[in-house]
Amino acid sequence: MTTGTTGTTDTGGPDAEVNVFAVELERWRDVRGFSRAALAKVMGYDRSYVSKVLSGTENPSEPFAAHAEKALRSGGALVAAWRDYDADRPAKTRPPAPPLPDPQTGSLVVDHDDATLRYEDGVYRLTQRRHLVNQGAEPITRYLIRISVDRFPGDPERSNQLYSENPLTWDEIDLHAWHGRGRANPMGWTAHHDRDAFKEVWLLFAGEHGHFPLYPGESCWIEYEYTVSEMHWGNWFQRAVRLPTRTLSVCLDFPADLAASVWGLHTSMTAQAMPFATAIARDDTGDRHIFSWSCEDPPLHARYRLEWDFRGRAASDGPPPAPSAVMAALGIVQDSDPALRRVARRFDLPAETEDARRVVTALNSACERVAQAHTFGKGMGIAAPQIGIDRAAAIVRTPDGEAITLFNPTIIESGGEVDEQYEGCLSFFDVRGQVPRSHVIHVEHTTIDGQPKITVFERGVARLVAHEVDHLHGQLYTDQMRVGVEPIPVEQYRGTGTSWKY
């Protein structure tokens, strides 16, 4: 069993300035399980040179840092550490070990949570490694893990039907777990919950070589691996922070010919979901594309969700697809679907809080997909019926980056001037139409905790919000246009990428 904390580099006496790059390199070497010789080999450097950099006696170069980043897939952490080191900034170290946890969260601290998800021939394989620290007063003999899948996020009825007819099985998962470095010490496990789309498992600090409890003050690596077919797993992977965690890192490993596009959303206990604060790194190596991302000190109960689109599957040798075809491929319901003409079902909040959060997460995911395919200088919005969900929820992202989430919205008052400006709709994106709207609208809506609220929106934001509220009441912007005015082809529109004019 591994004991102690993650390895660090000795850089001199207590007053010596810390070599932040050497510390970070040693940490990621430990996370990936490389010996110094193995790291030197994969980086293409002499072993003695790598050892000197790790010990702080040799100055690393920028190319060395880039090679280390590529080999260890730190999500940009090593490049950032080299920049700090090169700029000769004041000494920087990793944050001190977390304090003793609150009794309600248990005695475990996760020093590093690292996941690698690999897709190949219709199957996802997840390899999860965690460095655990027992900061409690009692030995730990088991560790709970969760395996949860959702083929159709945001549409629970469709997902429930899928897993009811074709449940996730233990044979498909083929779960294996190990303790310590490498895979020499298998861990036993027992099922805690067995559901059609959800499994909880106790990993046991015991195996064929006997018991190896994690005693107070000790630490160890655990690793587990399982598989899920793409029939059961949608294009998403989520990390939920359930224990105090110092570092969280994720790698997605996809075949290059699928031309994956990846984005990330950070959600919390509120309904809001926002893009990652730091970029997802991408490494195109041979026939694989590897996406990596990491963060330090994620807050408890935060959720970090990575999603992707395999654009290579839709590629063709013909002419570029029409804008409406692009939106349809991104999961946007098109105007021929009668669902867009129905009044969306209202949420009973706070009773349906969890359903509301799931819908908003699905809306933000769709927003990220669409934003990668088109530039929205005036802001954008998506209503739940546009992604096939019959619920009264919509999101708006303003040109300034503000995120607005609306549940059960209704326009109760309009005021100010009325002007006509062009609008576009993701559900028929081949045209743009001039729509008269009031400069000021008062919208009555419901907060996530069930409180009624009235919010006033003005000018361009009012137009964006009114457009989405229309969707939730079964209307399209063409219903608001003046008689005799028709939309124009998008090719004739000259306002793409520009802001509203008032």
Image (cartoon, grey):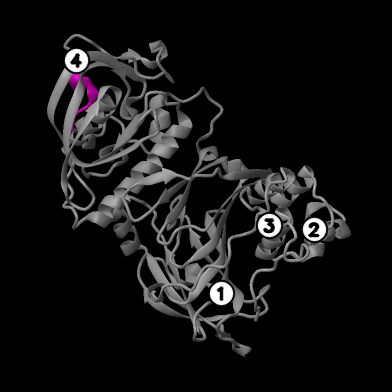
Badge 3: residue crowd in 10 Å (few <14, some 14–19, many ≥20): many
**Residue type, mark 4 in image:** Val
Q: Secondary structure at mark 1?
A: strand
Q: Dot 4 corresponds to which residue?
A: 418
Q: Are marks 4 and 1 in contact (CB under 8 Å)?
A: no
Q: Nearer the viewer, residue 57 or 266?
A: 57
Compare residues 104 and 405 and report the one nearer the observer. 104
**Amino acid under label 2?**
Gly
Residue under pointer 3: 24
Q: Is residue 19 left or right of residue 239?
A: right
Task: Say which mark, if any, is on residue 133.
Answer: 1
- The residue range painted magenta reads 474-481
Residue 187 lies in quadrant? bottom right
Q: Secondary structure at mark 2?
A: loop
| Quarter of the figure that contains the C terminus | top left
SS category of the residue bearing label 4:
strand
What whole-number distance in Å separates the C-alpha atoms at marks 1 and 3? 19 Å
